[in-house]
Amino acid sequence: MKTTLLIAAALLPPLAACTSARSPDRIDPTYVNSLAFQGMSCKALNAKAAETDAALAKATEKQKRAYTSDAVSGFLIGVPVATMSGQDIGAEVGRLKGEQWALGDVRKAKKCV
């Protein structure tokens, strides 16, 4: 029993590190099809781009807090608390980065920039 607990205690921090929140800087954009934006006017594209930029900035701050929380809790107790409580929004950050790229491509093609 004592050996099992020692093995579990030794494995917990590395396993927790594998599932912890990622830094927003290390999250790649997720593919977003630019066809969804093709029919928009330059004015609408620019407004959507500003909205996406603001949402990404907000999501990035949330993800930074989750990353920091997981780093601290992982070090102190060996458990990524933010990830386990649903505070990790890495997928949302990736989607917004992808949307930003798609909007940029359409805006350049339409010469809205």
Image (tube, rainbow, N blue to C red):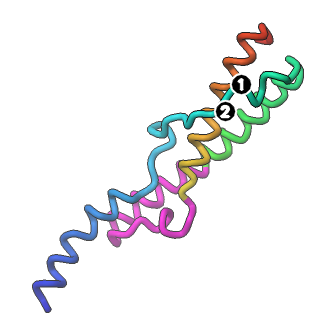
**What residue is shown at x 68% (from left), y 20% (from top)?**
104
For the C terminus, give its image quadrant: top right
Which residue is labeled 1 in the image? 103
Residue that appears at 69% across and 26% down: 34
Q: Residue at x 18, y 71 (%)?
A: 10
The 10 Å Cα crowd at callout 1, few under 14, some 14 to 19, many 20 or more, is many
On screen, residue 34 above or below 1: above
SS of the residue under disc 2: helix
Q: Is residue 96 left or right of residue 74?
A: right
Identity, as a three-letter code, of the amino acid under mark 2: Glu
Q: Is residue 93 left or right of residue 110?
A: left
Amino acid type for the residue under numbered disc 1: Leu
- Locate the N terminus by quadrant: bottom left
Stretch of the chain drawn in magenta: 62-87
How far, Cα to Cα, is label 1 from label 2?
6 Å
Decide: is 54 above or below 70: above
Q: Position of residue 94 (x, y in %)?
A: 56, 40
Task: Name the quadrant containing residue 98.
Answer: top right
Residue 63 pos. (x, y %): 55, 50
Apparent side of residue 1 relative to residue 37 in the rendered image (left or right): left
Q: Is residue 57 magenta?
A: no
Q: For residue 78: magenta? A: yes
- Crowding at dot 2, Cα within 10 Å, few <14 / some 14-19 / many 20+, comes out as many
Q: Quadrant of residue 11?
A: bottom left
Residue at 41% across, 58% down: 20
Q: What residue is pinned by disc 2? A: 99
Residues 2 and 29: in front is 29
